[in-house]
Amino acid sequence: MKIVLLSGSKVGSKTRTAMDYTKKAITEKYPNAQTSLIDLAEYDVEFSDGRNYLEYEGDTGYVTKTIMEADAIIIGTPIFQASIPATLKNIFDLLPVNALQHKVASILVTAGSSKHYLIAENQLKPILGYMKAQIVQTYVFVEEQDFHRKEITNDDVLFRIDRLIEDTVVLTETYTKIREEKEAAYGF
């Protein structure tokens, strides 16, 4: 199983802190999973110009191809100005419409206050649904107060991240099995 963690911002550290914890937890609990972390702050990704994702080279090509090869994607995003960052939206724009078909997507949100709790529900889930992802319905929302010195200090948040990981893996395994059985029934 290939799991890609996508840290969807070029600035700040809280989302990356949460994604680092998530990657470590996956590696410890599911050592056979191929897990990679893409932090958009470390890549020079071009703006989408309508080309097929296979035509992009460099960092843009690497990021899009890695996402397309994944079985599951855990998307980490901060909330800026009551919205997801443009860097994350650009990734979705670079991908084909059905890019997330047969993939499981889960969400981890960092925000300055609880006022932004429904941003994932109102902005990110519709995009993932449009792109045909199987969405883990519960997501993790982490507030400013849950961090101290680049560490998550709230045990409940850590528990919810561990549960998100488990739900992501179980859903991925389940959909993979169902899809394989359905394809085998065709006899090709």
Image (spheres, grey):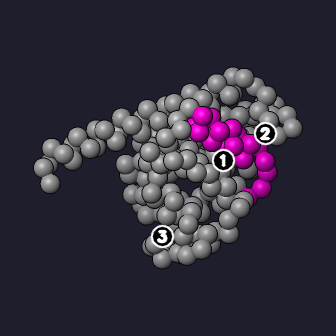
| Amino acid residing under circle 3 | Tyr
Whether residue 79 appears in this view of the structure is no
- Mark 3 or mark 1, which is nearer the start of the sequence? 3
Q: Pick the residue in front: 145 or 120.
A: 145
Q: CA distance from mark 1 to mark 2?
A: 12 Å
User: Which of the marked residues, 3 or 2, is nearer the chain's N terminus?
Assistant: 3
Q: Nearer the viewer, mark 1 or mark 3?
A: 3
* Residue drawn 49% across the image and 40% down it: 32
Give the main secondary structure of the magenta stretch.
Answer: helix
Residues rendered magenta in the picture: 10-28
Q: Circle 1 is placed at which residue position?
A: 77
Near mark 1 (Cα within 10 A), the count class, few <14, some 14-19 or many ≥20, is many
Bin the neighbour count of mark 2 within 10 Å (Cα to Cα): few under 14, some 14-19, many 20 and up: some
**With respect to residue 82, does 41 lie above or below?**
below
Q: Is residue 131 magenta?
A: no
Q: Quadrant of the C terminus?
A: bottom left
- In the picture, the disc for residue 39 is none
- Viewer-nearest of labels 1 and 2? 1
Label 2 element class: loop
Point 56% across, 32% down: residue? 29
Name the quadrant containing residue 113: top right
Judged by depth in the image, the label closer to the viewer, 3 or 2, is 3
